[in-house]
Image: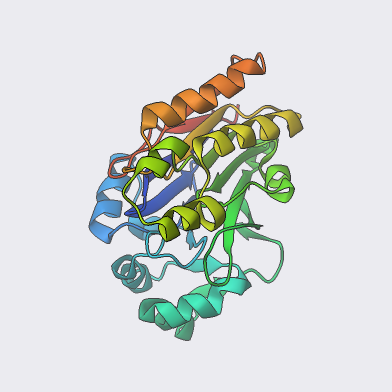
Amino acid sequence: MKNHLSVCVLGSSSGGNSTVIWNDTTSVLIDCGHGPVYLTERLQELGLSLRELDAVFITHIHSDHVNETTVRNLHKLCIPVYCPAQIEIPLVKKYRSVDALRKENFLHTFTTPEINISEFTVHAFEVPHDSDGGCFGYWVIDESGGIKRKVSVATDMAEVTESAVEHMADSDVIVIESNYDAEMLEQSGRPIWLKDRIRIGGHLSNEQCAEAVVRIIQQSTNIPKVFALAHISRQCNTNGLAHDCTTSAVKELGITNVAIFETFPQRPSRIMTVRKA
């Protein structure tokens, strides 16, 4: 496939999160929450290679976004890993593999708001989530060929701030979490402290996700083509509930040309491709 910018959520759940973004010459991974065998196999299915990644970006320190075995593998392959400066120390303290990366200068922090990775411009933006050092989403812009294409990824958010909406507006593809159904969470056997953690400091409900999608659309000059619903709880949600909630909200706006895609815990999503010509 030529002249494209593509996205695939390789897997998204409390068991692991990894998203790959690529074009003809450049590929980057947002989070590495799966093991190296899984990632290698999934990337190969897409015609990509773990060893040929240009960079990996970390959103926050939770273990479903950082797999130590994968980090050690990235180290052996000399693949640079990037993170916002705020989470560098928490990452290094939690993961010996990340500490090893830093000691050999394979761990890089953002010294400017944006960095260039081959043909991509990558920007980190902060989102609220109960993680030491904070949590971040990313947008990636590809302007090769003189045509701008943008992908945004934000898989863990306690709420969607106005700043996050502004960062994700005018994206072609957005990966955003739709973690739980409020009624299913309430009726689950989870302890009260965990329910409160999810509702208050942890994740977006289906309704919050749908509201966020509406806000992003309303603030976009160029309406996003695809929203992929990520980090769907296996105990307190279903893909159907998440999809129906956001789809209904978009239809109420009278918009029919926005696609809502599903993601899965242990298999890739559909490939989301934006042509550059």
Asked whether the viewer can see residue 2, the reply is no
Q: Which of 94 and 71 is in front in this view?
A: 94
Whole-percent x and y of residue 52? 39, 57
Q: Is residue 225 above or below residue 116?
A: above
Whole-percent x and y of residue 76? 33, 73
Instruction: Identify the residue at image location x=43%, y=65%.
Output: 62
* Quarter location, residue 73: bottom left
Whole-percent x and y of residue 258? 57, 22
Q: In this view, does 26 lie above or below 246?
A: below
Instruction: Identify the residue at image location x=59%, y=16%.
Output: 251
Extreme-bottom residue of the structure: 103
Whole-percent x and y of residue 54? 47, 58
Give the side of residue 116 with respect to residue 188, left or right: right
How many labels were placed on the picture?
0
* Quarter location, residue 29: bottom left
Instruction: Specify how the rendered protein is coloured.
Output: rainbow
Give the side of residue 221 with respect to residue 174, left or right: right
* Quarter location, residue 87: bottom right
Q: Quadrant of the C terminus?
A: top right
Q: Nearer the viewer, residue 155 or 76?
A: 155
Q: Quadrant of the N terminus?
A: top left
Asked whether the viewer can see residue 151, the reply is yes
